[in-house]
Image: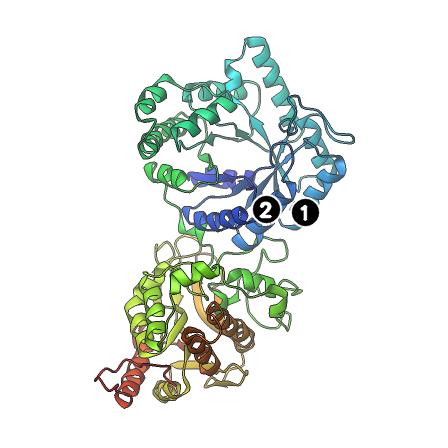
Amino acid sequence: MRISKKIEQSNKEGKLWWSFEYFPPRTAQGLQNLLDRIKRMTALGPEFVDITWNAGGRTSDLTAHMVKTCQGSVGVETCMHLTCTNMPKEKVDIALQEAKKAGCRNVLALRGDPPQGKDEWEAVEGGFVHGIDLVKHIHNEYGDYFDIAVAGFPQFQLLPPAERDLEMKYLKEKVDAGVNFIFTQMFYDVDVFIDWVNAVRAAGITIPIVPGIAPIQTWNGFLKATSLANTKIPQSFLDALEPYKNDDEKVREIGTRLVADMCRKILAAGLGIQGLHFYTMNLEKGTKMLLEELNLTPRVETIKPLPWRQSLTPNRRQENIRPIFWANRADSYLSRTENWDEFPNGRFGDSRSPAYGELDGYGIWLKQTKEEALKLWGEPKTFAEVASLFSRFCLGSLKALPWSNQAASSETSAIALQLAKMNELGFLTINSQPAVNGARSDDPQFGWGPSNGYVYQKAYLEFFVGPQLLELLLAHIERDSNMTYYVINKQGDLRTNTHSDGPNAVTWGVFPGKEIVQPTVVEALSFMAWKDEAYELGVKWANIYEAGTPSRKLMMEIFESSCLVNVVHNDFKDSQAIFEPFFKAGAEYAARHINGNGSAAPKALPN
């Protein structure tokens, strides 16, 4: 969606909104860390994110990559900066084409700063001289496809009258050329900002103004940023911050209160402004503290329009159904299905392409380096030690496993103790969801989708298990007609008790004025495609240990001999029923395999 439409919709609903700006980092590792941070920060509820174009135009490829990633795998609406600096027309057109291909519909058009190593700005041959030239070019080539923003400078209100009026004239000309909204440069003097907004309105400019808010992170950083932008600092800010200039935490704490007060004054000033744009400086803590100080809590509808993040690329924007197996590996699913002609919308079936991409195309790897993995998982030498790692992940004391690069989700806490017990009994869980019977769509733990709706889930468990323990489990499952399962081994032999060839919807929502939405399914062909990935991740874990070591041998044995199983309990009103067969089978297995010391904990793989 275009940002101007988002602003218009928020104004109609009378809701406050916020957005974040990021800049491309200099290194590949820095880029990956930032993308991980952007994904985490979507939980703070930004309506969109904004990606800068490096001063001097040196990181245009990184900007395009970040826009593509934010639109595609992060699933957040994105605005791309585009400058005239070092940018001939051909390069501008390539950037715009890539943005459109990624589904980005918002561009901040800027003249830009002088090229690196030069004090004065100069146009390149075949390039644009002024920001207004870039605005006109975008309109000429793309019509109204893109929302176009320009920068506004509240500090210009402090210029001598003749210069101030000239800058306002330039802004009005850009707006008249087809600009949809204005991002302001950061500021700290709220009175200057309010005066400038009133002057903009008096000049006949009526488009939305989005105030740029810069959290105060450190004293030195604060002084450097305000000096570079020639930003006026109110004396009250200096008086409050300078006594603590050597205490970063105290500066951040006081700065958060000062900036929050400034935001409150803006929102209460009757300017028609209901949104704030945060210059994060690629940092998480300062922005999060400021949102908390302002009591701006994200709406579930914003952060979870579906149980998983939708891709906003043009060909996937309407996709609303996915198999549950990739719940913790969305990037892999996106990659392995990127060549599908159509994506499931309304139902998962004939509309999809018949094949998943090969693993070689995406590549399977552990996110952790060998050193990080060893520190995280140690060197287990018994099955019980491996099972303990899985249990700790479910309980929240281990931050990652190969099948999930992030900590267990908040809904996992509802069944964490049951999952921990399952792992101790020999069922190594890699994916799960609890049963949910009509939680409100704004429920902080289970909610998703539009407001005033209700969401439902069938209990789901996915795990590795040895053959003998598996047979005991299946005997108990077969006694419950509400339970369905799929079992597959590493060779691809599939067993199931389901009599349906179609998918089993395990998540659905009921919302006012909409058909029932069924965004998550269990389905046989998808499970068979997922199997190779699930096993390969286990092998990658084994390979962090040296060949011939007990840890390597143990992990290889587990993933060579275990079966991968998924189980659904179709009675979503009974939240505990799915666990009963596991506890019974586990107890039965333990009784048959009591260790010599009287302990029922297995010394090795329950086979």
- Viewed as shown, does residue 265 lie left or right of 170? left
Q: Give the number of the disc on residue 67.
A: 2
- Viewed as shown, does residue 9 lie left or right of 596? right
Instruction: Assign a secondary structure to mark 1.
Output: helix
Give the image location of residue 409, x and y in percent.
38, 60
Give the image location of residue 517, x and y in percent.
48, 63
Q: Is residue 173 above or below residue 366?
A: above
Give the image location of residue 458, x and y in percent.
39, 71
Neighbours of disc 2 within 10 Å: few (<14), some (14-19), many (20+) = many
Q: Is residue 127 above or below residue 162?
A: below
Q: Is residue 160 above or below residue 16?
A: above
Query: In terms of image quadrants, where is residue 256?
Result: top left
- The amino acid on which the numbered mark 2 sits, given as a three-letter code, is Val
Q: Are marks 2 and 1 in contact (CB under 8 Å)?
A: yes
Q: Determine the residue positioned at 33% across, 74% down.
A: 423
Can see residue 106?
yes
Query: In terms of image quadrants, where is residue 575?
Result: bottom left
Q: Nearer the viewer, residue 319 or 188?
A: 188
Q: Determine the residue positioned at 62% across, 70% down.
A: 358
Q: Is residue 227 above or below residue 96?
A: above
Instruction: Assign a secondary structure to mark 2.
Output: helix
Neighbours of disc 1 within 10 Å: few (<14), some (14-19), many (20+) = some
Q: Give the number of the disc on residue 21.
A: none
Q: Earlier in the sequence, mark 2 or mark 1?
A: 2
Q: Determine the residue positioned at 47% across, 26% down.
A: 224
- Viewed as shown, does residue 589 lie left or right of 123? left
Query: In terms of image quadrants, where is residue 250?
Result: top left
Residue under pointer 1: 98
Quarter of the figure with the C terminus:
bottom left
Q: Nearer the viewer, residue 146 or 428?
A: 428
